[in-house]
Amino acid sequence: MALRTLRRRLRQAIEWLWRQEGSPGQRARGLAAGVFMGCFPIFGFQTLLGVALASLVRGNHLLAAAGTWISNPITYVPLYWFNYQLGCLLLGPGKGWPGGMTLGQDSLRQVGWDVTARLLLGSTVVGVVLAPLSGLLCLRCLQRKSYPDSGEWRP
C-alpha cells in the first residue's frame, strides 16, 4: 500500500514538472539552480537563493524552489555528512576537535572554521556535479515529452 502511494506521488510530481511554464531549457535551468543551492547547509535561505540563482540563469522559479528539496529533514544528515567527508578528502582532515580541557575560544573558532571550510567546499563540489546532471536529466525528459517522434506536443 505504501509503495503504491509513493509511486502515485512520484508520478504526480513528474506530471507537475511537465506542466510548468517556460521552455524545457528554462525549466531545466530552474531545477538545476535549486539543486545547486539545496546542496548547501543554509537552512531557511536555500529556497530564496535558489530562486535568485534561477533568475540569474533565466530558469523557472517554481522548479528552483522545488530543486532545493534535495535537502530535507530526511536527507540533511547523509547529504551534509557526505559533503563534509568530501571536503575533508580535498582539504585534509583538519585539526579535529580539541580535548575538553584545552577548549578555549581560539580553538573553538579554529574547529568551527575547519568544519565550515570542509563542509562548504564539499557542498560546492557536490552542487557543481549534481546541478548540471539534474538539469540535463530534466531537459532530456522534457524534450522527450515535448517533442515525441511525431514532432507534436503531448500534454
Image (spheres, rainbow, N blue to C red):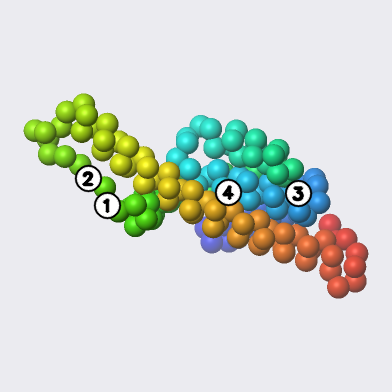
Residue 121 can be seen, yes or no: yes
The residue at 54%/37% (across/down) is 46
Which residue, given by chain and number where applicable, does mark 1 sit on? 93
Q: CA distance from mark 4 to mark 2?
A: 30 Å
Residue 26 is marked as 3
Q: Nearer the viewer, mark 3 or mark 1?
A: 1
Q: Nearer the viewer, mark 4 or mark 2?
A: 2
Residue 1 lies, in percent from the top left, at: 54, 60
Q: Residue furthest bottom?
A: 149
Which residue, given by chain and number where applicable, does mark 4 sit on? 35
Q: Residue furthest top?
A: 105
Mark 4 or 2, nearer chain start: 4
Where on the picture, by quarter, is residue 53? top right
Which residue, given by chain and number where applicable, does mark 2 sit on? 96
Mark 4 or 1, nearer chain start: 4
Residue 63 can be seen, yes or no: no
For the residue labelled by badge 1, is the local secondary structure a helix, a strand or a loop? loop
Mark 2 or 3, nearer chain start: 3
Q: CA distance from mark 2 to mark 3?
A: 43 Å
The local crowd at label 3, few if under 14, some if 14 to 19, many if 20 or more residues have their Cα within 10 Å, is many
Where on the picture, by quarter, is residue 60? top right
Mark 3 or 1, nearer chain start: 3
Mark 4 or 3, nearer chain start: 3
Residue 94 lies, in percent from the top left, at: 26, 47
* Residue type at the position of mark 4: Val
The local crowd at label 1, few if under 14, some if 14 to 19, many if 20 or more residues have their Cα within 10 Å, is some
For the residue labelled by badge 2, is the local secondary structure a helix, a strand or a loop? loop
The local crowd at label 4, few if under 14, some if 14 to 19, many if 20 or more residues have their Cα within 10 Å, is many
* Residue type at the position of mark 2: Gly
For the residue labelled by badge 3, is the local secondary structure a helix, a strand or a loop? helix
Q: Is residue 5 left or right of residue 40?
A: right
Screen quadrant of the C terminus: bottom right
